[in-house]
Amino acid sequence: MVDVTAKVRDLYQEFGCTAVIRPFTHKDETTGETVSVTISPQYSILRVGDREYYFMRESGAFDGTSIVARE
């Protein structure tokens, strides 16, 4: 039986494609820190606590950071 996921992953790596990640939220039980990934048309956004890290969706290149405003 062929592992299709492994084949697709290998093709992505061979052609230098960026990683595909689904949006998620995870609360670290040890530190209490929340980590999440969201997606916009232009960016994949990694949030760790109050910091957001922006990565271009097409290239995966890091594009900057911001701090989440508290209300």
Image (tube, rainbow, N blue to C red):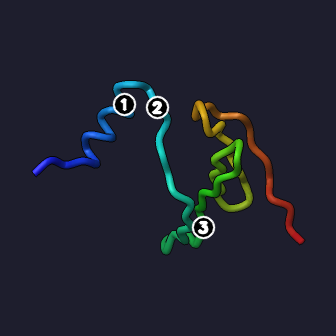
User: Which residue is under mark 1?
Assistant: 13
Is 64 placed left or right of 44 in the picture? right
Is 27 placed left or right of 8 in the picture? right
19 in relation to 15, above or below: below
- CA distance for labels 2 and 1: 6 Å
- Between tags 3 and 2, which lies in front? 2
Residue at the spot 59% in from the left edge and 62% down from the top edge = 35
Q: How many marks?
A: 3
Which of the marked residues, 3 or 1, is nearer the chain's N terminus?
Answer: 1
User: Which residue is under mark 2?
Assistant: 17
Check disc 2 and give the amino acid type.
Cys
Is 63 placed left or right of 59 in the picture? right
Residue at the spot 71% in from the left edge and 42% down from the top edge = 42
Residue 16 location, x and y as percent? 44, 26
User: Which residue is under mark 3?
Assistant: 33
Check disc 3 and give the amino acid type.
Glu
